[in-house]
Image (cartoon, coloured by chain):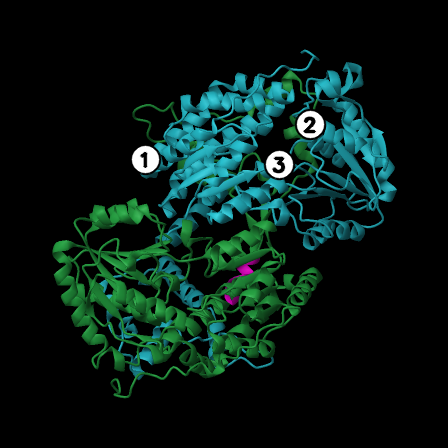
Chain colours: A green, B cyan
């Protein structure tokens, strides 16, 4: 079945706009409930945490159809994108946490050390306390419920504040929450600025959020650690030596998925001036492949979340000096903007003032990559940086001379979905990371511990006053020497401790076995 | 050794106007990408090590001027620890950097162990405390001689200079100090969204087990007296107050007095004459701690004398009431150790939990159940069983607080990670775009694309039944360790084919094993 000829999906005029906000006076009450739960020690029980993780997974799975409907209402998002990007990834996160939390929560030892080995040093994993997760509108499940999974797995009772820009989805989550989740452990708060302010006025033990400076400042008052997932202008460095069809397909996919309203969406493309024409040709071909009936008729395109954002983007398209190559159509009644590709965009164009966060893709011709690198390094560190090239030297040069949250080669955005990779920014694109074990660690305090038996005072007794010269001697005898020569030209290999490192107790059985075997072999065999 | 006040030259502060210039110089230095080379980092680390080694006498002298601290303490608490940190970094930085090739940017680092920041490839500004007059001056003198001035700088000064530093934008701020200043630093950092690591402090409690099973009063008294009095109590992880069962109170007081007597014997003039006892850092701090002693509440059972001009305060033990004491308010940070009798361990735990989370919590008990009981019911930066202070020096353990005792970690590998950004990366080949792989993600979306994406991405399968439901066949089959079973079968087959060859005769393994045992038997080993 190909694409149909019916007009693009109708974004309802937000019939469900009446999102029920959480009453302000309830908010301190909610925090007190959570504080009581935490104090009861109930969340230390791993079985309890696992039950909650499962319940959350089933909340998403059993209401898949209702979520797909809600996404259509709020964001006009196609089913495939809802499934792949929101529901299944988040369920996957729940399952990963559910499978691994026993392992993650085990006290962790440290590498054996001659001096301190006898004191059995280890790290206990303890929940930090109460968590506050503030979610964005663009990925209302993945980026709100996703980080919350870490808090649930870590044993932190938490509040999830959903975005008020996605009223249907936020309302649906709030409706379903009491049916599946233990309200003493996690609660959903809906609302706009006053509600968020009320949340921020309270003391939490860890927050993660997307309203950057306000959250960070409010947290500093209570010395609360924060994880910030912000954004930035993610640049693409493109070299036409690779298959341009592959490159353009992937870039256009990243730009149009959720109508470009992704924090890791490619923001602009740098291409050498003489290669621009080739690239534009490839983009035109890909565009026709994606939207055979024209973008306006495609069911595969999401819509813009609010009128405010729509007008911001429309103004940008009107003001820019770049030449439109594809797209450019807008429809205010549907909050629809066709994916728009522009060429010959200058570095000082209005489009380049801030993160675009919409389906507009400027191509910036540069005289060489150094110009693009200088521009990127002069600005804030982006959340992600993309390189499309098969030239190993160029890739290495770009990776080595830039700083960004993530860097993908010949791909975009997918690093978020790779299990085991952290997702987080650097500098103005945020701090801290989440996804999988990183989410768990975010909400967990690594409590170091040693257990020093009585007899070790035979070894460390020199630490007690009065300090005599013989005590000073034994103290100095345990002082190490620097294993590298004084720097000068040619300081190179620092030996890693030499053979001595290998004489650690865990090798003793092996050494004994080897010694016995060698002894056996050296005996003359009897005739 | 003179008993007179030790004269210190006033510390030369950095001109406020220069601070921005230094900041820009470091930023430029970082941009040259010199620090990306591991070789360069190792060089600078070794230089830092040699700076301490070559000048250890001058450092010891500076500590003497600032604290009148004994060489052994300086060695244990400062020089030796930084030294081993340098060595640990030198040894391991190659390995650490392998997984995390892209270093963070520029840093702002307040107190001593900056080794890991260098190891992570940062340009660093160090602001020593202005109270350590002699040490700060020495650092300012030696730094440019040993380390690359384009990358590493020292700023000395007090409030005005620090304010200027905080106005500028850094990429990581590491602060060690008080909660009040910690809040100022965190708020200034939030303006620039700069991640911070805060090492604050707070009142670190000790719980003593008085039950016959876990009791070890003598050991506790000795180690706690040492932990509190070392560096004259000016240690962030030092024991701050001791919760002791009421029935053990007298015994504990007696033991701790004995311990103090053995450390600073009165036959040799007591703590004031002892070269093993340090001084308070400044007159201001001295007055603050003295006020705590002059309060009318509680009872001072040992020490209490002070000599303002000399900044000398005798090791002081007091017995205080849990609900009514001056000394259980703010962190003491001096040589005063309040002993607080409690009726039960639960009372002690409830008291600790009613306050801010401490940086360290110590228990003295030989009973594993008691250790576990307290550990599970409290929160603290670190948890020490039968000892104190050592958590900050153990290689491989993170050192950091929780709640108002700070956040973030340092020491060794954790310091490296604090100053490093782990940059996720992937390289996706063109054949990933086959329709059966990730090709289905591109529009136009058809029905089959949705099912294909479900197949690849996982269709949200949850391998565990809902509450109260029985597991499905798929779930039960999924629980069987198929890979392990397969491994076992292969291993059995391999063993079999090694033991017997194709003709059913013994293979070389059988030959060797039976030969080995036969040889042993013949030699009469067994």
**What is the magenta range?**
A98-105
Say few, some or many: other residues with alpha carbon within 10 Å of mark 1 (under 14 / 14 to 19 / 20 or more).
some
Residue A101: where, in percent of width, then height?
54, 62
Q: Left or right: where does residue B11 sit relative to residue B205?
A: left
Q: Left or right: where does residue B91 sit relative to residue A393?
A: right
**Distance between mark 2 and mark 1 Cα atoms:** 43 Å
Q: Quadrant of the N terminus of chain B?
A: top right
Secondary structure that dominates the magenta span? helix
Q: Chain of mark 2?
A: B
User: Which residue is at a point 38% across and 53% down the rendered structure image?
Assistant: A405
Residue that carries the numbered disc 2 in the rendered image: B284
Q: Nearer the viewer, mark 2 or mark 3?
A: 2
Residue A334: where, in percent of width, then height?
35, 80
**Distance between mark 2 and mark 3 Cα atoms:** 29 Å
Q: Nearer the viewer, residue B515 or A384?
A: A384
Residue A282: where, in percent of width, then height?
16, 67
Up-down relation of residue A164 to residue B174 (above or below): below
Mark count: 3
Q: Which mark is residue B390?
A: 3
User: Which residue is at a point 37% across and 27% down the rendered structure image?
Assistant: B148
Residue B35 visible (yes or no): no
Q: Disc 2, disc 3: CB below 8 Å?
A: no
Q: Which mark is residue B34?
A: 1
Q: Earlier in the sequence, mark 2 or mark 3?
A: 2
Q: Secondary structure at mark 1?
A: helix
């Amino acid at each position: 079945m190909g694409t149909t000829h019916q007009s693009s999906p109708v974004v309802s005029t937000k019939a469900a706009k009446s999102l029920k906000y959480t009453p302000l006076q309830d908010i301190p009450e909610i925090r007190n409930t959570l504080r009581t739960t935490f104090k009861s020690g109930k969340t230390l029980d791993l079985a309890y945490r696992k039950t909650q993780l499962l319940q959350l997974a089933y909340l998403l799975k059993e209401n898949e159809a209702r979520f797909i409907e809600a996404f259509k209402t709020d964001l006009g998002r196609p089913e495939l994108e809802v499934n792949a990007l929101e529901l299944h990834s988040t369920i996957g996160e729940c399952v990963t946490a559910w499978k691994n939390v026993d392992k993650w929560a085990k006290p962790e030892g440290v590498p054996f050390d001659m001096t301190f080995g006898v004191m059995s040093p280890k790290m206990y994993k303890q929940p930090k306390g109460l968590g506050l997760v503030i979610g964005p509108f663009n990925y209302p499940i993945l980026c709100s419920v996703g980080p919350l999974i870490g808090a649930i797995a870590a044993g932190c009772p938490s509040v999830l504040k959903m975005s008020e820009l996605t009223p249907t989805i936020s309302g649906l989550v709030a409706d379903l929450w009491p049916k599946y989740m233990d309200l003493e452990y996690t609660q959903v708060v809906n609302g706009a600025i006053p509600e968020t302010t009320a949340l921020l006025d309270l003391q939490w033990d860890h927050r993660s959020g997307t309203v950057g400076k306000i959250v960070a400042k409010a947290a500093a008052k209570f010395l609360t650690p924060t994880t910030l997932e912000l954004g930035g202008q993610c640049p693409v460095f493109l070299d036409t030596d690779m298959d341009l069809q592959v490159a353009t397909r992937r870039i256009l996919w990243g730009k149009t998925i959720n109508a470009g309203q992704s924090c890791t969406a490619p923001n602009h493309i740098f291409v050498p001036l003489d290669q621009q024409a080739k690239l534009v040709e490839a983009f035109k071909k890909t565009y026709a492949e994606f939207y055979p009936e024209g973008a306006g008729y495609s069911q595969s395109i999401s819509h813009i979340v609010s009128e405010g954002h729509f007008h911001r983007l429309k103004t940008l398209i009107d003001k820019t000096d770049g030449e439109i190559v594809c797209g450019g159509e807008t429809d205010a009644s549907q909050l629809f903007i066709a994916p728009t590709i522009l060429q010959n965009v200058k570095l000082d164009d209005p489009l380049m003032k801030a993160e675009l966060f919409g389906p507009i893709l400027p191509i910036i011709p540069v005289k060489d990559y150094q110009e693009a690198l200088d521009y990127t390094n002069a600005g804030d560190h982006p959340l992600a940086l993309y390189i499309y090239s098969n030239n190993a030297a160029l890739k290495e040069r770009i990776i080595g001379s830039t700083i960004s949250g993530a860097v993908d080669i010949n791909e975009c955005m997918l690093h978020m979905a790779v299990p085991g990779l952290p997702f987080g920014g650097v500098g103005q694109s945020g701090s801290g990371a989440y996804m999988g074990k990183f989410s768990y660690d975010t909400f967990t305090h690594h409590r170091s511990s040693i257990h020093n038996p009585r007899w070790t005072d035979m070894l460390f007794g020199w630490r007690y006053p009065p300090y005599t010269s013989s005590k000073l001697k034994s103290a100095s005898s345990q002082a190490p020497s620097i294993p590298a020569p004084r720097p000068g030209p040619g300081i190179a290999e620092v030996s890693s401790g030499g053979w001595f490192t290998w004489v650690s107790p865990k090798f003793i059985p092996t050494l004994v076995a080897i010694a016995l075997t060698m002894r056996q072999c050296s005996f003359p065999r009897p005739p | 050794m003179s008993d007179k006040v030790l004269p210190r030259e006033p510390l030369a502060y950095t001109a406020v106007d220069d601070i921005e210039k230094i900041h820009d110089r470091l930023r430029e230095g970082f941009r040259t990408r010199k620090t990306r080379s591991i070789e360069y980092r190792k060089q600078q680390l070794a230089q830092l090590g040699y700076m301490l080694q070559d000048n250890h006498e001058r450092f010891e002298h500076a500590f003497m001027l600032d604290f009148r601290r004994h060489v052994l303490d300086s060695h244990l608490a400062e020089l030796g620890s930084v030294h081993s940190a340098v060595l640990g970094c030198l040894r391991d930085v190659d390995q650490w950097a392998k997984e995390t090739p892209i270093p963070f940017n520029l840093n702002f680092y307040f107190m001593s162990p900056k080794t890991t920041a260098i190891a992570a490839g940062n340009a660093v500004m160090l602001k020593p405390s202005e109270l350590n007059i002699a040490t700060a001056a020495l650092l300012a003198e030696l730094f440019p001689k040993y380390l690359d001035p384009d990358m590493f700088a020292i700023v000395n000064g007090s409030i005005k200079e620090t304010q200027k530093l905080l106005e500028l934008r850094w990429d990581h701020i590491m602060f060690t100090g008080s909660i009040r200043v910690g809040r100022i630093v965190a708020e200034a950092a939030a303006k620039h969204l700069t991640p911070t690591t805060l090492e604050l402090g707070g009142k670190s409690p000790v719980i003593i087990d008085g039950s016959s099973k876990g009791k070890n009063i003598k050991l506790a008294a000795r180690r706690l007296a040492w932990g509190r009095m070392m560096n004259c109590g000016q240690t962030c992880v030092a024991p701050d107050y001791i919760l002791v069962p009421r029935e053990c109170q007298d015994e504990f007081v007696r033991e701790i007095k004995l311990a103090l007597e053995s450390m600073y014997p009165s036959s040799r003039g007591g703590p004031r004459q002892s070269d093993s006892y340090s001084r308070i850092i400044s007159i201001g701090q001295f007055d603050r701690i003295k006020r705590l002693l002059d309060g009318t509440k509680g009872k001072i059972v040992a020490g209490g004398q002070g000599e303002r001009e000399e900044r000398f305060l005798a090791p002081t033990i007091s017995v205080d009431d849990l609900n009514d004491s001056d000394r259980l308010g703010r962190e003491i940070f001096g040589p005063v150790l309040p002993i607080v009798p409690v009726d039960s361990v639960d009372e002690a735990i409830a008291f600790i939990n009613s306050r801010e989370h401490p940086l360290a919590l110590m228990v003295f008990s030989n009973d594993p159940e008691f250790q576990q009981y307290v550990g599970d019911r409290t929160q603290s930066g670190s948890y020490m069983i039968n000892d104190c202070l050592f958590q900050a020096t153990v290689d491989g353990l993170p050192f950091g607080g929780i709640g108002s005792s700070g956040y973030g970690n340092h020491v060794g590998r954790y310091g490296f990670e604090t100053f490093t950004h782990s940059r996720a990366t992937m390289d996706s080949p063109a054949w990933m775009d086959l329709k059966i792989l990730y090709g289905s993600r591109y529009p136009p979306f058809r029905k089959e694309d949705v099912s294909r994406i479900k197949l690849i991405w996982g269709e949200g399968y949850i391998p565990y039944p809902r509450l109260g439901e029985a597991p499905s066949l798929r779930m039960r089959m999924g629980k069987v360790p198929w890979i392990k079973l397969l491994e076992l079968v292969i291993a059995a087959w391999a063993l079999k084919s090694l033991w017997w060859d194709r003709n059913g005769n013994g293979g070389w393994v059988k030959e060797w094993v039976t030969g080995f045992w036969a040889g042993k038997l013949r030699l009469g080993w067994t």
